[in-house]
Image (spheres, rainbow, N blue to C red):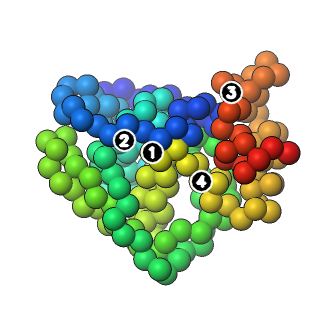
Amino acid sequence: MTMRPIVRFGDPVLTTPTTPVTRFDQHTEALVRDLLETVDSPGRAGLAATQIGVGLRVFSYNVEGRIGYVINPEIAELSEELQEGEEGCLSVPGLWYPTTRAERAVVTGVDLRNEPVTLEGTGLMARCLQHETDHLDGILYLERLDPRIRKQARRDVRRSDWFMLDGRPEKTIAGLPSAFGGTG
């Protein structure tokens, strides 16, 4: 098992929809082990494969003592009841913003044996399920922000010490217009 480095905002892998897993072999097992090890650190609730640079549809979670993973997750159900709360992302380090999510979420997918899995939760678990599935669809939580807050988030990202490297974006800013609904 390996604790993998986290890909940061600006890398196109974060805004590219993932490919479903079709091979359930030792490579998929290794990916799941890496995701589980990487998410198993304080302050980490979830981790999508895209966040370690892998464009496959897999995420791990670590919420309130529950650690696990889902392969090929899809949102099956969202409650009409909403929750408001601060949300952050390992790929957008140090920046937290009020984000509205469904209070309850149900995700379906499969495990390493390609057997059906259903995962449901409320509160933080529901937020995690929605956030990580969004990642796999190429959506960063910043896109879910109220437009005024998104504008402030854009400024905060540009001012962050992790966004620029040698005067240039760390990788590319291809995700900037998408994640913020335009430039400016």
Q: Residue at x 22, y 49 (%)?
A: 110
Structural distance between the alpha carbons of marks 3 and 1 = 19 Å
The amino acid sitting under disc 3 is Thr
Q: Amino acid at mark 4?
A: Tyr
Q: Position of residue 52 (x, y in %)?
A: 47, 32
Indicate which disc residue 172 carries. Answer: 3
Q: Compared to 1, does 99 lie above or below? A: below
State the mark number for residue 136.
1
Position of residue 25 measured from the top left corner of the image (x, y, whole percent): 18, 28
Disc 2 element: loop
Quadrant housing residue 28: top left
Drawn side of residue 124 relative to residue 94, left or right: left
Quarter containing the N terminus = top left
Question: Residue tagged by mark 2?
Answer: 57
The picture places residue 17, in percent across and down from the top left corner, at 47, 41
Residue displayed at 49% across by 81% down: 81
The residue positioned 53% from the left and 33% from the top of the image is: 13
Mark 2 crowdedness (10 Å alpha carbons): few <14, some 14-19, many ≥20: many
* Mark with earlier residue (4, 2): 2
Quick check: marks 2 and 3 in contact, CB under 8 Å?
no
Mark earlier in primary sequence (4, 3)? 4
